[in-house]
Image: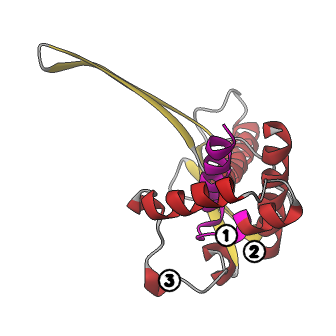
Amino acid sequence: MQATKLIAVALAAIALSACQVSPLQKLMASGALDDSAADKGALDKFASERPAMLKVPSELLVPNLPLVERRESLTATGYAVISVQNSKVPAQQRLMAIRAAKLDAYRSLAEQVYGLRLDATATVADMVVQNDTFRSKVEGVIYGATLVSITPSGDDTYETTLTLDKSTVQDLRMLYLTQLTAKSR
C-alpha cells in the first residue's frame, strides 16, 4: 500500500514538474513520505521501470532543474467568436467575446501548470468502432498572470494572450503537491 502511494506521488511529481526526481526528494525531505528502506526499494524499482514518455531527453536535463525553470514564463492564448455570444447588442457581444477569450487563455495556462485529465471510451463491435468518446478536465488555481494582448483576429474572433512568470508557476505547483500529499494521508 505504501509503495503504491509512493509511486502515485512520484508520478504526480514527475508529471507536474517535468523533472526526474527533485519534487519527490523535496516531499521525502519534508517528511510527507516515509523514508524507509522498503520505500527506497520501491522508488528505485519505479525509476527503472517508468514509461519512456515520462523520461526527459538527456540533452534537456539540467540536474534537479525542472523544465519550466529553463523558460522565463508560460504563455497561453485563448480565442472566442463574437457572433455566438448571447446578446443582441454588438458592443456587448464584443465584450463577452473578450471575456470568453480571456477565460480560454486561463484554461490553457492551467493545462500547462497542472496537466490535463483525459477520460476516453471506445466501443467496438464486429471489428468496427461503434462509439468513441473522450472528455477532458483541467482543475487548478491560477494567479499572477499578466495580460499581454487582446486583439481582434479576423472579422468575428478575439484572441487574448496571457503570461505567467516561472516563479509563480513553481509556487502553484508546490501548493498543488502539498494539497496532494495532505489528501493522501
> Looking at the picture, does residue 182 appear above or below residue 145?
above
Rendering coords of residue 183 (x, y %): 82, 38
Q: How far is disc 2 from disc 3 in space, using C-alphas?
A: 17 Å
Rendering coords of residue 27 (x, y %): 79, 61
Query: Tag 2, which secondary structure?
Result: helix
Q: How many marks?
A: 3
> Looking at the picture, does residue 145 appear above or below residue 107?
below
Mark 1 = which residue? 74
The residue type indicated by label 2 comes to: Lys
Q: Which mark is residue 131?
A: none
Q: How is the image coloured?
A: secondary structure
Magenta residues? 1-24
Rendering coords of residue 85 (x, y %): 65, 32
Mark 2 = which residue? 166
Mark 3 = which residue? 60
Front position among marks 1 and 2:
2
> Looking at the picture, does residue 22 appear above or below residue 102?
below
